[in-house]
Image (tube, coloured by chain):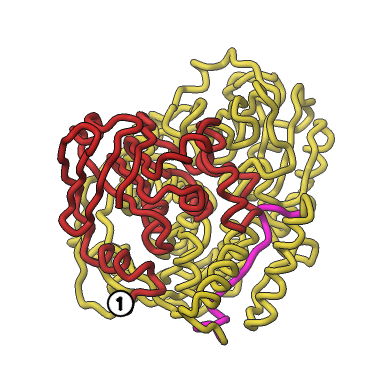
Chain colours: A yellow, B red
Amino acid sequence: MNITEKILAKSSDKPKLEPGDVIFANIDKVMLHDVSGPGVIKTFEKLENDGVVKIDKLFDPSMIWVTEDHFVPSVDKISAQNITKLSNFTNKFGIKKHFKYGMGQYGICHSMSHEEGLVAPGELYVGGDSHTNTTGALGAFACGLGHTDIAYAILKGRLWFKVPETLYFKLDGKLPDGVMAKDYILKIIGDITTEGGAGKAMQFGGSGIADMSVESRLTLTNMTTEAGAKNGIVEPDQKVFDYIEKRGITEYEPVFGDDDAQYEKTFEYEASELEPLVAKPFSPDNVSVVRETSGIELDKSYIGSCTGAKYEDLLAAAKILKGNTVKIRTEVLPATISIYKKATQDGLTQIFIDAGAVVGPPTCGACCGAQMGVLDKDEVCVSTTNRNFPGRMGHIESKTYLASPLVAAASAITGKLTDSRDL
Amino acid sequence: MKGKVIKYAQDNIDTDVILPGPYLKLHEHAELAEHAMEGLDPEFHSKVKNANIIVTGNNFGCGSSREHAPIALSASGIEAVLALSFARIFYRNSVDGAYLLPIEIDEKTYSSISENDELEIDTNDNSIKNLTKNESYSMKPFPELIKKIIDAGGLFRYNE
């Protein structure tokens, strides 16, 4: 069995599983945020009113953690009410791990999962958000779900899964200068399309992965969601163990695929052949080489989100922006307070501000069109985020080009889509 | 079930257009219904007065995990979506939350059905009758567990 099959087998007490098998599996960790949390609360209210279940206690409050990220700071009365509801809920059911806006460490749920060491290798983790796939870079089975499933998971500690087929991406070689993990995953999505991984596991391995930082791997698994995948995953190695041990996880049971692990299909990539890429409107698989789109005029550069505002992403952007001045609106939103703090200690925040950019609080913000810099009609944005469907970041006729932090920073300086190597 | 069709002859209708991001803070089903398909079809609300089935292409419901999307459609009166394929979370949310039937159809069925056709769908024998055109099609049968969850009325009503 491969790593995905082995984690599902372990969690369902089955000696062997094959793609297509349907199982009920035990859940190790569950995440809710200020959108899926109130959704779960509403689901429970409805079920109780209909007399389907009585909810006195949850399966195990210690397996649950909660973030506030989509509508913080609260944008209006409804979003403020959702935050209050969430606090009442975590108080009532004894959920201790509730990371609140303005109370120390908090941030975007997926970034919190690795920054805070909330999920360990070998675990089965589900979250009420589609980019839950991100955390698979730590060697966990990580999968996004809706309110009803998350409600079921926290009440019963179990959920059904169909064992996915696995696509294996063998990545070799070192990334050339100017190229980041974001370019790698855009290349892959461009090749296999937004349906290419539908319902499947996407596993990454090879010498390129061994060479890559944990944060870069997280960029790859994050956007497996854009290929339609059930989960993205990387077999854990010493880099992962060092990463999580620094964050306080000392007891864990990593899972590795067997030597004879099967994959539905294997794709091979060589890093030295990659170039900086963008996904043009209106789909993450509408991919072009940056140099072929260089003339495109921009209104804004957005450096944020779970996929594009980790420390490494901010460091890449700061290297480009240092000593330069932005020509277009440029917004930098570190993904968590811990990242914000490190960026400030290391002088990155100062570089952004000196360049004329604004540095905002951690939030999903404009990535999902919620707040903090949404786009007007016809506005054009280069963004380190993960989706560019119509209206994703604001007006239905706004346009988003998805790119790496290097490209977003270089483009901020020129006001046009720019390969950082051409500055 | 029986009803009339709204057809969107396109692939990859994503959750950002089915229920746009700014409304994720809403959780009352009736309020979500007001914004259903806001990013795709301004006429949806007038169309859905006389129709309860959507027919569409591949990868319907791709994008986010928001359960708001099937809720908004269901609370607007949509009872079934017939698509060439579905994004996995939309499909799962529709079934586990018992909002609507996500039914997979083949290319021939997809191209045969037109806007405003009246269909009769039977999930027990996997048949679709087009009463307007006097044609019959088949749907892809639901996998065993999915059928049981649908018949139970959602995941919480299903007995493991």
Q: Quadrant of the C terminus of chain A?
A: top right
Q: Is residue A112 above or below residue A245?
A: above
Q: Identify the residue shown where x is 65% and y is 49%.
A: A364
Along the line of sight, the residue nearer the viewer: A142 or B23 = B23
Task: Determine if the magenta segment contains residue A250.
Answer: no
Q: Is residue B18 above or below residue A7?
A: above
Give the side of residue A224 with respect to residue A406, left or right: left
| Residue bounds of the magenta highlight | A57-73
Dot 1 surroundings within 10 Å: few (below 14), some, or many (20 or more)?
many
Give the side of residue A243 with respect to residue A163, left or right: right
Residue furthest out toward the bottom: A56
Q: Is residue B128 above or below residue A87?
A: above
Give the side of residue A290 with respect to residue A236, left or right: right
Where is residue A343? Give x, y as percent: 74, 50
Secondary structure category for the residue under label 1 = loop
Q: Identify the residue shown where x is 70% and y is 27%.
A: A376
Q: Identify the residue shown where x is 56% and y is 16%.
A: A294
Along the line of sight, the residue nearer the viewer: B147 or A317 = B147
Where is residue A362? Give x, y as percent: 71, 52
Q: Quadrant of the N terminus of chain A?
A: bottom left
Q: Give the amino acid at mark 1.
A: Ser
Where is residue A324? Give x, y as percent: 77, 26
User: Would you name the residue on which mark 1 appears?
Assistant: A12
Q: Identify the residue shown where x is 56% and y is 62%.
A: A114
Along the line of sight, the residue nearer the viewer: B13 or A175 = B13
